[in-house]
Image (cartoon, rainbow, N blue to C red):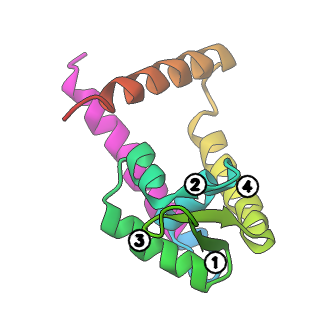
Amino acid sequence: MRTNDLGKYVGVLHRRFQIVINRELTLPALNATNANFLLFISEHDRVTAKQIATTLAINKGLVSRELTRLDTAGYIDRTTDQQDHRTSWVQITPTGQAACTTINALMQQLWDQVLADSTQTAIDQTHTELAQWADRASELK
């Protein structure tokens, strides 16, 4: 196996999922990119745009634009930090939480299809290693 093939395979999985999610996700103002933001937000009490950009390795400008879409559609609320007015806190709304249920169901269907022939042990091992690799990659500059 060539190590560079790993990037190719991860990229193919990502792009194929993006294509299907963009086609199948019918909730207003949601697309594959901001759906992932919404899932990330739902996993935290509150987050900042900087935390989203850093953790998901996404351009701050894109995060800002997509958060505006999510806010306008009622999926999130943004509040300004009282100590630092440059910082806005982002929280999920009940509408956003309901959307996450739909997004998670769609993603689960996709993963079930892709992983149909894989053992749970192999899936767990791959998950662990991908998480470790992502942590190491966060140190790349």
Ranked by sequence position, the earlier of labels 2 and 4 is 2
The span picked out in magenta is: 1-22
Q: Distance between the residues labelled 1 and 3?
A: 22 Å
Give residue 117's position: percent from left, percent from top. Answer: 61, 27
Q: How far apart are marks 3 and 2 (CA)?
A: 13 Å
Ranked by sequence position, the earlier of labels 4 and 3 is 3
Ranked by sequence position, the earlier of labels 3 and 2 is 2
Nearest to the observer: residue 23 or residue 47: 47
Q: Does the magenta stretch include residue 11?
A: yes
Which label belongs to residue 26? 1
Task: Provide the secondary structure element on which disc 1 rests.
Answer: loop
Q: Is residue 99 left or right of residue 65?
A: right
Amino acid type of the residue that numbered disc 1 sits on in the rendered structure: Thr
Taking 6 as reference, is 39 above or below it? below
Judging by the rendered image, the residue that carries numbered circle 3 is: 64
Q: How crowded is mark 1: few (under 14 residues within 10 Å), some or many (20 or more)?
A: few
In which quadrant will I find the C terminus?
A: top left
